[in-house]
Amino acid sequence: MQKILCYCQVIVALMMMSCERFLDEKMVKSLTVPTTTQDLEALLKATGKINISVMPSLLEIGADDYRVNESGFNNLTEFERRTYTWAVDMDYQLVNMANEWSKSYEIVLIANTVLEYLPKVEGTEIDKKRLRGEALFIRSWCFYNLAQVYCSVYMPNSDNAGLGIPLRVHSDLNVGSSRATVAETYAMIVSDLLEATTLLSTNRTHVTRPDRTASLALLARAYLAMSDYDNALRFSREALQAKDDLMDYNSIKVNDRIPFERFNKEVLYHSTTAFMQVLNPTISYVDPELIGLYKDGDLRKSAFFTLAKEGYFTFKGSYDGTISGSHFVGLTTAELYLILAETLVRGNKVKEGVDVLNNLLKKRCDKNSFIPLSIHDKDEALKEILDERRKELVFRGVRWTDIRRLNLDGRFARTLTRTVAGETFILPPNDPRFVYLIPQDVIHFSGMAQNKR
């Protein structure tokens, strides 16, 4: 046990160095090294480093589901104000660099350490197989979320030769970093997840640790972001065959201050963003356009939102079971229903897709007034499903990705606008600002190319 604690402390120390120098410091030579699978298991159990308040808040800050009034805006940090207004330049403070960039690469470092030491340590082949699957998953999870922030949107029927993210596959801090292409970035995400599905079982330890169903769900999410609807359909269906549990909101106290328990039965993998004040319900309120999408009898309006004194709604419905500027962005069965419904409709199976959507909605609407949707037109069904994605997956880290991919389709492209103190800020479809700048310190230390403006 002492050796495990020592090794974990070493990894933490290395990660602290990486936060300052982006994984380019020299490794200390005389460190305790893992010798058993239990040592490596201890690294993957570090939920405070891997699951809690670690994913980029930029997954949500730029999206259109919330607003900040003038007084709230003036209380934000410079980084938050510039991000909220989609500024051309970004001033990363150290804490923002850690939250938006380095924390994800710290997790990648843990995954790479496990992957490199697994062949060398003592332990059963069963344990080694499972730990390899978990490490591949968490590395893919980080790469996927970073790609939504720092890569151009994946373009179907394109070579996707634009700048991707650094694909760190070594724990050796001496190995420099360079940017892969967008195509290479997504190819690695998919490749690692496909292997993980062959290694992981459906015998879950805890939702802070991935199993095979979580890996299938992330494949479905990744393929949807790539507009690869055939594969998104395939993996969402396969994941739901393994686990299709939904909470019935009729049996939940939707008016409670915190209606949802952390680790509820819909959660496949638990993960939350780093805290950001601009996303805190004490500062922000929900976009009135989004509120207007919820119809009478939709229990999500009461479960997700609270009516504030000023007449605005604030968000309370996190599956993390908390109310703060850190939001749940993990994987759920409900998201799989929506992926399956969308991809079925896109594949001209309109009735089947609408039926899948109804299976979700009947657990979200008042049972005494719910009337199943009956839609036969493909375009109408697709629009309904996309609206339901926005309503169901609010503040789940997917809206920014949805806007980016749907901007490729003129039917659903959106121009985002925000007004602060009488000044209006605009983000038109496919603008370069849909890709965030990499922190300048990272560019300085690594020599990598910066995203264009």
Image (tube, helix red, strand yellow):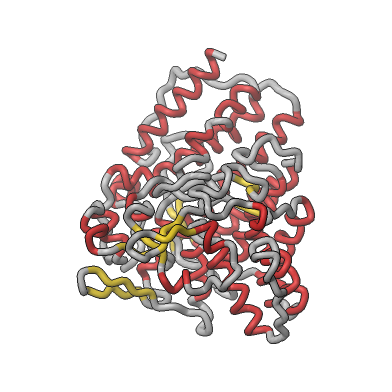
Residue 445 placement (x, y as % from top left): 31, 45
Farthest-out residue, top: 2
Vertical placement of residue 345 versus 52, above or below:
below
Residue 231 seen in the current view: no
Q: Is residue 33 above or below residue 417?
A: above
> In the picture provided, is 56 more to the left or to the right than 318?
left
- Give percent across and percent down for residue 404: 48, 70
Q: Is residue 312 left or right of residue 295?
A: left
The spot of residue 178 in percent (x, y) is 42, 51
Residue sitting at x 53%, y 20%: 33
> On screen, 379 above or below 337?
below
The location of residue 443, given as percent across then percent down, is 32, 51
Taking the spot 42% from the left edge, 61% from the top edge, the residue there is 307
User: Quadrant of the image for the C terminus?
Assistant: bottom left
| Towards the viewer: 164 or 274 | 274
Please state if 272 lies on the left or on the right of 229 as rendered. Answer: left
* Left or right: 95 in relation to 286: left
Q: Quadrant of residue 112?
A: top right
Residue at the (75%, 41%) spot, across then down: 201
Quarter of the image for residue 285 reads: bottom left
Residue 430 appears in the picture as rendered: yes
Quadrant that contains the N terminus: top right
Q: Nearer the viewer, residue 79 or 173?
A: 79
Toward the viewer: 37 or 402?
A: 402
Residue appearing at x 50%, y 21% in the figure: 7
Q: Residue furthest bottom?
A: 377
